[in-house]
Image (spheres, helix red, strand yellow):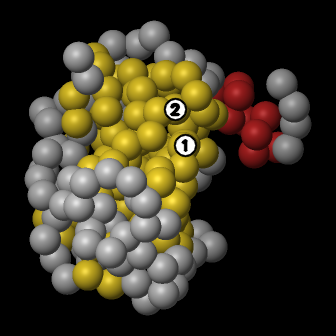
């Protein structure tokens, strides 16, 4: 059975005045996590699609297979709406990632940064966004309310350091 990573309910002020990837930096604990789904909180009136993804913090590169489009035209208001990844991915133990949702100026409303809680398997390091480069802000907080579902342990695609070096250099694998 999958576990929801972010356990708190968003409640900060709503906004829709910025175009960026919005969310948080997370740190995975002592055990790898296999992610099957990503999601975003649906506020009243939300009806657009949002790319939700996981990026490796040290490189800023999207985890291969680590994103999906979440369609908020369906789902229940004031809950997370999820979309399955094409196949599960593994987030390595003792590694930091950005968990973010794509937001658009004058699009669906999203929550301003606020304190958030997670399961004991990961830590919310800080709120973060990318509007051209990664910026980290408030410790223990998140923007926009992205989330993911996971199980303990590996089993999904695990990118290696060589993979990321090739991606940075523009090479192919």
Residue at horizontal 75 percent and vertical 45 percent from the top: 168
Query: Vertically, is 155 above or below 90?
Result: above
Tell me where residue 38 sits by quadrant. top left
Query: Vertically, is 65 above or below 21?
Result: above
Residue sitting at the far front: 74
- Residues packed near mark 1 inside 10 Å, few (<14), some (14 to 19) or many (20 plus): many
- Residue 5: mark in rendering: none
Q: Position of residue 170 (x, y in %)?
A: 85, 44
Q: Is mark 2 in CB contact (under 8 Å) with mark 1?
A: yes
> Which is more toward the observer, 143 or 169?
143
> Which is more toward the observer, 170 or 43?
43
Cα distance between the residues tagged 2 and 1: 6 Å
Q: Position of residue 172 (x, y in %)?
A: 87, 31
- Residue 85: mark in rendering: 2
> Which is more toward the observer, 120 or 9?
9
Q: Earlier in the sequence, mark 2 or mark 1?
A: 1
Q: Which element type, helix, strand or loop, lies under badge 2?
A: strand
Q: Position of residue 50 (x, y in %)?
A: 50, 60
Residue at horizontal 70 percent and vertical 26 percent from the top: 162
- Residue 136 visible in image: no
Query: Vertically, is 36 above or below 15?
Result: above
For this view, does 164 lie left or right of residue 121? right
Residue at horizontal 62 percent and vertical 47 percent from the top: 61
- Residue 89 visible in image: yes
For this view, does 47 lie left or right of residue 172? left
For this view, does 121 lie left or right of residue 153? left
Q: Which residue is mark 1?
A: 67
Residue at horizontal 14 percent and vertical 36 percent from the top: 119
- Residues packed near mark 2 inside 10 Å, few (<14), some (14 to 19) or many (20 plus): some
């Amino acid at each position: 059975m999958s576990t929801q990573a972010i356990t708190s309910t968003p409640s900060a002020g709503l906004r829709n005045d910025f175009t960026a990837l919005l969310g948080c930096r997370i740190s995975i604990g002592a055990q790898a996590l296999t992610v099957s789904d990503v999601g975003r909180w649906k506020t009243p009136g939300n009806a657009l699609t949002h790319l939700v993804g996981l990026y490796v913090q040290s490189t800023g590169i999207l985890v291969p297979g680590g994103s999906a489009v979440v369609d908020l035209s369906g789902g229940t208001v004031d809950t997370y709406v999820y979309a399955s990844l094409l196949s599960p991915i593994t987030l390595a133990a003792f590694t930091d990632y950005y968990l973010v949702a794509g937001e658009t100026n004058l699009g669906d409303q999203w929550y301003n940064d606020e304190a958030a809680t997670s399961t004991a398997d990961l830590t919310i390091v800080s709120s973060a966004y990318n509007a051209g480069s990664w910026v980290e802000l408030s410790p223990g907080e998140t923007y926009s309310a992205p989330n993911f579902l996971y199980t303990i342990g590996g089993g999904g695609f695990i990118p290696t350091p060589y993979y990321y070096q090739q991606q940075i250099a523009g090479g192919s694998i």
